[in-house]
Image (spheres, rainbow, N blue to C red):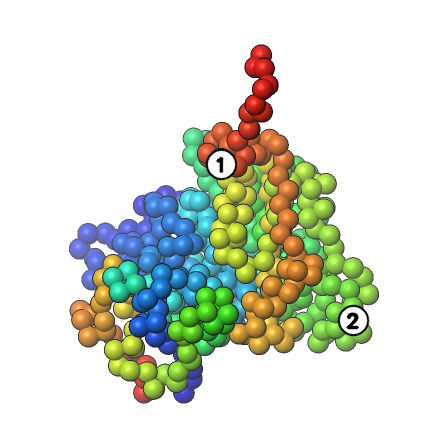
Amino acid sequence: MYLVANIDSEICGKTKCTLCTQYCPEANTIQYDKIRNTAFVSVDRCKGCMQCVWVCDTLAKHHAIKMVMIDQLPKEQLRTALDMHYESSNLLKDSKINLPHAELVGK
Amino acid sequence: MSLDYVKVSPGFEKYIAKEYRDFVEHGPFGKKVSVSQVGTFKEALEEHPMCAGCAMTLFIRLAIIAFPNPEDTITVGTAGCGRLAISQAMIPFVYGNYGDTNAVASGLKRGLMTRFPDKYKDVVVMAGDGGLADIGFSMMMHSWFRREKFTTIMLDNEVYGNTGGQESGMTTRGAVLKMAPLGKKFDKIDMPQLAKTAGCVYVATVVPNNPRRVESVIKKAVLIAREVGPTYIQAYTSCNIEYAIPTDKVMEDANNVEKDRYQFQEYITDEAKQYLADKWGYSEYKKKEIPGEVKA
């Protein structure tokens, strides 16, 4: 098991801060949902470096990001990089393509 | 080297990888994207094998977002950590051998200027401190003396991070490393000063703790290199493995180093200022009319 970043969308949705998306060293990992105004993590790309946690706690002072064991994540938070949507809120269950490795995440 | 090199032939959409389709539909090519929009478009950089929390990765990611025309850009790199990520982008990457990155880039840029005289094609060298300040030093200096029109970006992690921690020319005096246990006996090379002397028209030192500043510096450097002359950016990108920085303290370290020896400096010649103001509308470089002055 390993740690991944998890963003509390209730806290994040109240702000318009996008600092974690800018400071994440991995490309296409912290995405931004324009409809719900919240950042979210594509968990299969997260390397668990905790820079977003530092940014959210120290620079933004929102304390919305916590590190969570991947098997403790709620099912609806399990978004992968293949599940990117860019315009609309599109959770894993709505995805039309079959994602073989999405099911492996979390086991 | 055009928008056509990422597209899907009609009828083949369902066989193409999702990442590729995402890139065609939501990628930055042909659009103007900025660091503040990041997370809402598909970035040109893809997954790469660099260490978790590496500041060099962050800088490369920001640099690739900041390129003014990513679809008309070629990156040149060499052995070292940086090429592991730069080569994983949707931007053509040329692997120069150790030492000849700037020579390869010179030829590439001259060829592109001959082949596409009416278009801007950017060449950007991104290599480490070993690849540019030690091994590639003479090629780099000579490309500047010849005033070749491309951008050189040094990813300065102050150590040979990929081979176990030997000291490089850019390591600070007294630094003790795994393969340099007695500490370095000489000072860090003052590359920005050398770049100014060698004829670079734009020189900047940055730390990636300020994404928007990184973006503006890279945009300016690439634009100036299109017509005016060579440009040089030196970025502090700490090695959290060799210098044993915990990954969540990487940005704190960047802040401390910025205060200590990596203050943001920008050197820009008058010619380059005028070019940016006239051609690309940079209002901060427009000549201010002094009130009361009589026009001839």
Q: Which residue is mark 1?
A: B282
Check disc 1 and give the amino acid type.
Tyr
Residue at image location 55% in from the left, 28% down from the top: B288
Q: Residue at x 72, y 67 (%)?
A: B167
> Residue B22, can we see it?
yes
Quadrant for the C terminus of chain B, please. Answer: top right
Q: Within 10 Å of the Cα at label 1, are there few (<14), some (14-19), or many (20+) other Cα atoms?
A: some
Q: Quadrant of residue B80?
A: bottom right
Compare marks 1 and 2 and give the one earlier in the sequence.
Answer: 2
* Numbered disc total: 2
Disc 1 + disc 2, Cβ < 8 Å: no
Q: What residue is shown at x 42% (from left), y 48% (from top)?
A: B70
Q: Residue furthest front?
A: B292
**Label 2 element class:** loop
Residue type pointed to by label 2:
Gly
The answer to whether residue B272 is left or right of residue B92 is right
User: Gap in Å between the C-alphas at discs 1 and 2?
Assistant: 45 Å
Q: Answer left or right for B38 relative to B75.
A: left
Read off the chain for label 1. B
Q: Is residue A28 above or below residue B182?
A: above
Quarter of the rendering occupied by the N terminus of chain B: top left
The tag on residue B208 is: none
Q: Residue at x 47, y 31 (%)?
A: B279
Give x and y (percent) for residue B5: 34, 48
Rendering coords of residue A91 (x, y %): 23, 71
The quarter of the displayed image where residue B150 is located: top right
The residue under label 2 is: B183
The local secondary structure at tag 1 comes to loop
